[in-house]
Image: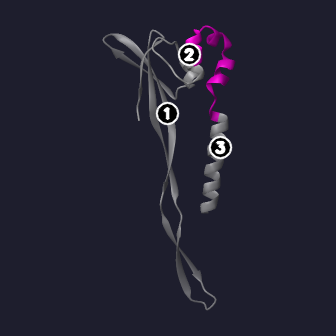
Amino acid sequence: MVCIRSVILIIFSVLFVFIGCTSPQKRAEENPEAFARLSKDQQRMVLEGRIEEGMNEDAVYIALGRPSKKRDMRIEGETINNWIYSRTVTEEIPAFRDRYYRGHNGRLYRSCYYDPYYRSYVVDTFRVMFKSGKVVGWEELN
């Protein structure tokens, strides 16, 4: 039972890496017009996965990918768009179970074995703030 859970967790992790993630280079190739509109310095930065104030949403998408969620907030009458990036955290919870079996002599025996379970949850890690379509700030959330 423990081995099957571990194998399933590894398979899903590998699939997530290959299906769910793309690189800045790949996103630039998918959006050649948006990439071409960036200055040479900005092109270099987004390919390195970095952003700076004044970048547009296309540049941030190329650098960081699709956000997990978008939220708007109002500050002093102005709308600030927030792109929030998240990641899934999986942790192993230790657990021990008892197993009962009959020995060759017919007596009942008990053995203890390690049988952890796993808990996954989403953690917001990074936020980029836009005003009128341009980056005005960002912050690491965890």
Q: Residue at x 63, y 34 (%)?
A: 20
* Above or below for 44 versus 15: above
Q: Quadrant of the C terminus?
A: top left
Give the answer, above or below, for where 66 lies relative to 125. Answer: above
Res 104 quadrant in image: bottom right
Say above or below: 122 vs 7: above
Ranked by sequence position, the earlier of labels 2 and 1 is 2
Assess whether residue 25 is covered by the magenta stretch. Answer: yes
Q: Nearer the viewer, mark 2 or mark 1?
A: 2
Residue type at mark 1? Answer: Ser
Examine the rendering and report whether any part of residue 93 can be seen: yes
- Residue position marked by numbered label 2 in the rendering: 59
Q: Are marks 1 and 3 in contact (CB under 8 Å)?
A: no
Q: Is residue 30 above or below residue 108?
A: above
| Amino acid of disc 2 | Ala
State the image coordinates of residue 60 (x, y, percent, origin top left): 53, 19
Residue 62 at least partly seen: no
